[in-house]
Amino acid sequence: MEITLTGHGASFYDFVHVEHGYLLPRFHVPESGAAPSFAQPPHGTTILALKYLDGVVIAADRQATEGYQVASRHIEKVYKADEYSAIAIAGAAGPCIEMVKLFQVELEHYEKLEGEVLALEGKANKLAQMVRQNLPAAFQGLVVIPIFAGYDLRKSEGRIFKYDITGGRYEEGDYYSTGSGGKDARNTLKKFFRPGMTREQAVRLGLEALLDASEEDVATGGPDPVRGIYPSVKIVAQTGTNDLPEDEIRQMCEALLSERRR
Amino acid sequence: MAIPFYVAPDQMVQDKAEYARKGIAKGKSIVAMESAVGITLVAENPSASLNKISEIYDRIGFAGVGKYSEFENLRKAGIRYADLKGYAYSREDVFSKSLANAYSEVIGNIFTREIKPLEVEILVVEVGETPEENQMYRILFDGSISDHHGSVVIGGQAEKISQFLRDRFRDGLRLEEAIKLGKEALEAGQGGPIRENTLEVAILDRARPGRKFRRFSALDLRELLAKASLGS
């Protein structure tokens, strides 16, 4: 590798695209159309985000599926993007994870070059561009659908953004959920969401929504006390982006499960 | 056909070096020191927004003296280099050694090929998991590179300041002691007091998780220097 002195902006994506394009994920679409039947990559399923008093709770189940098969029981779908934002991803796992990785570097790169952190709006827009770049692959079945949650330091509030495959970016007021069990989770969120919930109430509601999704959607993984696998939850607030301790998640999931026991 | 002037290579190199040295001598110096917590960088910089010290990657910091636009360009190139390497391989694979070599190569090439050499001197420092693994590289305007332990100085008064530090620097300085010593060394270099608000100080803190670079605000600095003078 060499040092590149010639001018580039503050975008890592643009730099790699121009100088080292081979490093970027690129999925060529064959002219004939449909993907061969064996090419069914792992897919991540249900993700959600909801606001609470001091920020946003962002969570996902841990399962990835390959058609009717379980590809992984403990895949990670929620990532810290930078100090004040997090991203959850649903869709083809490979391209999803690659996009997250690129997005994380993009944010850090900008921050180091410019000496300023991007505004939350700017981060959300950058992600939209990256999702848009994936459109040809999305037509091949390699869909990447993120939810982006962040704490807006200028407005002093948590914000949630959802995306469509064309890179369309829409802000959600209270909550959102997507992925294969997204609609089921959304039903639960819709029924029980209240503005100004405490962190604990919001986490509980998020976990309940994921539990409901796992009951209605075969691709979504439920809490798994046997293997000790529970949904992953991150909290985005003014104090930064942090994992919710696994113990806390486990206890809440167990409480939810025992409520349903007969 | 016009016959190009013949200039002996040694004459050309000498002229270029002199030109570069003159440019660098105008600038203020920067001190980097190993201390108990990591690596401390101290510079005199009247500007609060045009930095001379900055973050490259998790464990790697950068400092430059001379022409701002030139070392700023080098800084950005270094960040691109490191981020690309971290993205293509992994975060653990980004080392200061390869970055310093890449810098040396590109600065050296400019020195030999271009009419005008870069009027810069830079430092690439990396905090290791143990003090023994710390790395400090100094790269000159002609691409020559050297590695250092303990302390290293770049800039116009580097010689004088190194002399000052030779007797006073010791291993295992506390953070505030290192900053104070850095300030005194810079003052010795320019032969007059330096106001606290014109100091730019940053540290690569071994104890921080992930990105170890931290810049001190004017307020932090005042407190640390007060602490240091209380201690002594």
Image (spheres, rainbow, N blue to C red):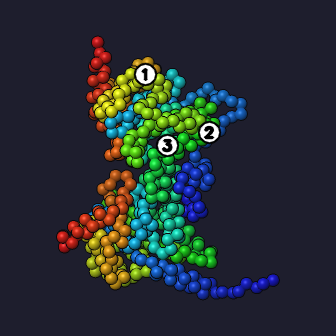
Q: The residue tagged with tag 1: helix, strand or loop?
A: helix
User: Residue B53 falls in which quadrant of the image?
Assistant: bottom left
Figure quadrant of the N terminus of chain B: bottom right
| Comparing labels 1 and 2, the label whose residue is closer to the camera | 1
Q: Which amino acid does label 1 sit on?
A: Asn
| Comparing labels 3 and 2, the label whose residue is closer to the camera | 3
Quick one: label 3 or label 2, which is nearer the N terminus?
2
Quick one: label 1 or label 2, which is nearer the N terminus?
2
Badge 1: chain ID? A
A193 shown above or below A23: above
Q: The residue tagged with tag 2: helix, strand or loop?
A: loop
Q: What residue type is labelled 3?
A: Ala
Figure quadrant of the C terminus of chain B: bottom left
Check disc 3 and report the residue beneath it.
Answer: A124
Q: Residues within 10 Å of mark 1 (few under 14, many from 20)?
A: some
Query: In 3D space, how far apart are the residues under numbered discs 3 and 2 (Cα atoms)?
Result: 23 Å
- Labels 3 and 2 in the same subunit: yes
Query: In 3D space, how far apart are the residues under numbered discs 1 and 3 (Cα atoms)?
Result: 25 Å
User: Residue B44 falls in which quadrant of the image?
Assistant: bottom left
Image-based side of A45 in relation to B127, left or right:
right
Check disc 2 and report the residue beneath it.
Answer: A27
Residue occupying the far right of the picture: B1
- Please provide percent x and percent y for residue A218: 46, 20
Check disc 1 and report the residue beneath it.
Answer: A187
- Please provide percent x and percent y for residue A131: 56, 39
Quick one: label 1 or label 3, which is nearer the N terminus?
3
Badge 3: chain ID? A
Q: How crowded is mark 2: few (under 14 residues within 10 Å), some or many (20 or more)?
A: some
Q: Which amino acid does label 2 sit on?
A: Phe
CB contact under 8 Å: marks 3 and 2: no
- Labels 1 and 2 in the same subunit: yes
